[in-house]
Image (spheres, rainbow, N blue to C red):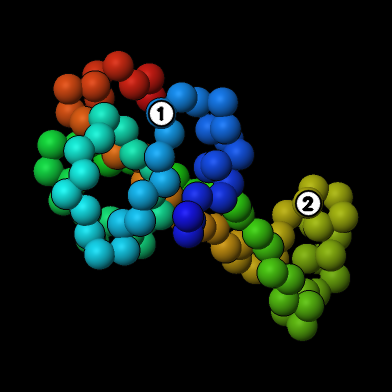
Amino acid sequence: AAGSWPMAWYLRDTPEVQYPSLGDGTDLEFDAAIVLERSLDGIDTTGYDVSRFPIRSTWVVDWGAADIGDWWRWLSRREVWNDTQSEWMALLVADEHADALER
């Protein structure tokens, strides 16, 4: 299923996990779901607590933008000099279960 990686790996031992397609919206009922954030527009989130989180963060190096100070900060503290990119996910939990979440 599109977008299931890496969740398929993280949740591999979890019973009753499904990977339905949400491309055309959904009328599915679920207690909890993890979806790509860009899929939220097609989902009615009424009755769900929605928490967004980044996953698969990467740093695409802009070699031409680095100066000697940037290189020093990279070598000494691993500080990047241009923005990182992430895939954003959303955790939807039915309101009746949301109180059980630890934040």
Q: Compare residues 78 and 7 and report the one nearer the observer.
A: 7
Q: What element carries label 2?
A: loop
| Residue drawn at (87%, 55%) of the image | 75
Would you say residue 93 is visible in this rendering? no
In the rendered image, residue 49, in percent from the top left (x then y), is placed at 23, 36
Horizontally, residue 71 falls left or right of residue 36, namely right
Task: Residue at 61% x, 62% y: name it.
Answer: 84
Earlier-in-chain disc, 1 versus 2: 1
Which of these two is toward me, 93 or 13?
13
Task: Reply above or below: 85 against 52.
Answer: below
Cα distance in 3D space between marks 1 and 2: 40 Å
Foreground of the two, 38 or 75: 38
Position of residue 72 in the picture relative to residue 83 (left or right): right
The answer to whether any part of residue 2 appears in the image is yes
Q: Tags 1 and 2 in contact by the CB under 8 Å rule?
A: no
| Mark closer to the observer (1, 2) | 1
What's the residue type where badge 1 is placed?
Glu
Left or right: residue 40 compared with residue 60: left
Q: Which residue appears at 56% of the width and 26% of the height? A: 13
Query: Residue 29, labelled with which disc?
Result: none
Q: Which residue is rendered at x = 56% and y = 50% of the image?
A: 5
- x and y, in percent, of residue 33 in the image: 34, 39
Residue highlighted by disc 1:
16
Q: In this view, does 89 lie above or below 31?
A: below
Residue situated furthest left in the rendering: 46
Residue that badge 2 annotates: 78
Secondary structure beneath label 1: loop
Q: Which amino acid does label 2 sit on?
A: Arg
